[in-house]
Amino acid sequence: MPKADYRRAAADRILPVRARGDLQIVEMQFGGESAYMVHDPVAGESFQFSSEEHALLTALRQPVSLRLLQREIETAF
């Protein structure tokens, strides 16, 4: 954590987690709504994500704080 980071409110600190860059994502349509198949090539598993979950995953591909993450999701949905 950067030295000055401890002075920030917890919601404004950059989250110490990131989405892995090797995840493979394919958009699909189910019942007229978007869904996303996320494949983890390391584990060999696939997962179905909703639009909201996909937006969170996409936002976590770059450094982001909880406050910014909340704003992004609220704006999108």
Image: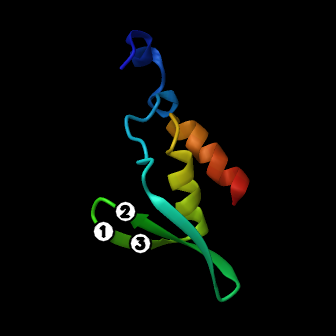
Helix, strand or loop at label 2? It is strand
Q: Residue at x 53, y 36 (%)?
A: 64
Residue 28 position within the rendered picture, expressed as x and y whole percent measured from the top left? 61, 77
Which residue does the numbered mark 2 point to in the structure image? 40
- Examine the image and state in which quarter residue 10 appears: top left
Q: Residue at x 56, y 69 (%)?
A: 26
Q: Amino acid at mark 1?
A: Gly
Residue 43 position within the rendered picture, expressed as x and y whole percent measured from the top left? 27, 63
Helix, strand or loop at label 3? It is strand
Alpha carbon separation for disc pair 3 and 2: 8 Å
Alpha carbon separation for disc pair 2 and 1: 6 Å
| Side (left or right) of 26 relative to 22 | right
Residue 15 position within the rendered picture, expressed as x and y whole percent measured from the top left? 43, 35
- Which image quadrant: the N terminus? top left
Q: Amino acid at mark 2?
A: Asp
Considering every residue shown, the one lying at the far top of the view is 3
Residue 68 position within the rendered picture, expressed as x and y whole percent measured from the top left? 60, 38
- Examine the image and state in which quarter residue 23 appears: bottom left
Marks 1 and 3: which is nearer the front? 1
Please tell me which residue lies in front, 28 or 12.
Answer: 28
Which residue does the numbered mark 1 point to in the structure image? 44
User: How crowded is the residue under tag 1: few (<14 C-alpha within 10 Å), some, or many (20+)?
Assistant: few
Q: Is the Cβ of the residue at disc 2 closer than 8 Å to that at disc 1?
A: yes
Which residue does the numbered mark 3 point to in the structure image? 47
Q: Residue at x 67, y 52 (%)?
A: 74
Q: Is the Cβ of the residue at disc 3 closer than 8 Å to that at disc 2?
A: yes
Q: Amino acid at mark 3?
A: Phe
